[in-house]
Image: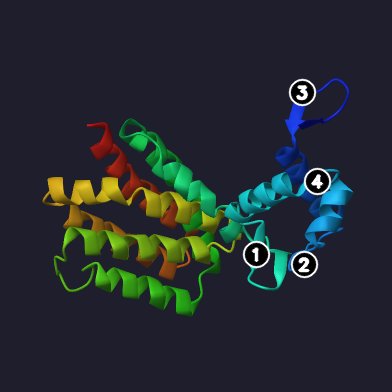
Amino acid sequence: MSTSADSTGPARSQTDVVVEGIKRMILDGALAPGQRLPVEADLALELGVSRGPLREAVRALSLMGVLETRQGAGTYVTALDSSLLLAPMGFLVDLHAPDDSAALHAVRRVLETEAAGLAALHITADQLRDAQSALDAAGGTDGGTPEAQAFVEADIRFHQVIGQASGNPVLAALIQAFGGRTARARVRRAVADQGALARTAAEHTLILAALRAHDPDRARVRMANHLLAVENFLSS
């Protein structure tokens, strides 16, 4: 059984009807972040669907970070913050073929270059300490040479701090999705290029210096140069 969107549009499944119906309820203010959905029978009646498709739609929206089911308490709208709603993008990035790595890193460079500029204006003392801590873990101050995987994990933390310091939660969530999911290529570079770890540590140090100076132009340039090195490796 299917339901049509209108008399001229293509037929839609009942699951699609529920997804669109709940989306419309949220946009119209009938459902607010943190609010419990009506009981299953009432919601199915309101949307004109059976319970099976309703449950399928609720599961789909839960995977998307829109809804959450609490055992014994019902289903609720999440906080709808960017970190939840954009989290599935990381899964999609994971599915990209290796040939797309350079393209993914190019998008990452655009996002993180702007984030660095914004972070230079907004970064707090606590965030500077967090960035320094990640830099230390990556061997950026004592000349250490950690194992490649550990280095990249510290690298990811460093970039996430900068994303959060940008003051833009959507930008920070996108950086987390792209940065964490492109780690494999960065580990590959660290293993293949013996000088990559030392160069990356030096580039991180320059980025952090620009952030400490609250110099957005310098921070953008330092970040762009840093990420171009990864792109050049992937394109070679």
Q: In this view, which residue lies farthest toward the left?
A: 194
Residue 21 - label? 4
Instruction: Note whether residue 202 is visible.
Output: no
80 with respect to 158 (left or right): right
Gap in Å between the C-alphas at discs 2 and 1? 9 Å
**Split into 4 quadrants, where in the image is the C terminus?**
top left
Image point (27%, 37%), residue name: 234
> What colour scheme does the image use?
rainbow
Sequence-first disc among 2 and 1 = 2
Sequence-first disc among 3 and 1 = 3
Gap in Å between the C-alphas at discs 2 and 3? 31 Å
232 with respect to 35 (left or right): left
Which of the 4 quarters of the picture holds residue 167? bottom right
Residue located beneath label 1 in the image:
69
Which residue is at the front of the view, 90 or 161? Answer: 90
Instruction: Note whether residue 49 is visible.
Output: yes
**Split into 4 quadrants, where in the image is the N terminus?**
top right
- Near mark 1 (Cα within 10 A), the count class, few <14, some 14-19 or many ≥20, is some
Residue located beneath label 3 in the image:
10
Residue located beneath label 2 in the image:
36
The kind of residue tagged 1 is: Thr
- Near mark 4 (Cα within 10 A), the count class, few <14, some 14-19 or many ≥20, is some
Image point (39%, 47%), residue name: 224
Which of the 4 quarters of the picture holds residue 62? bottom right
The kind of residue tagged 3 is: Pro
Image point (67%, 73%), residue name: 72
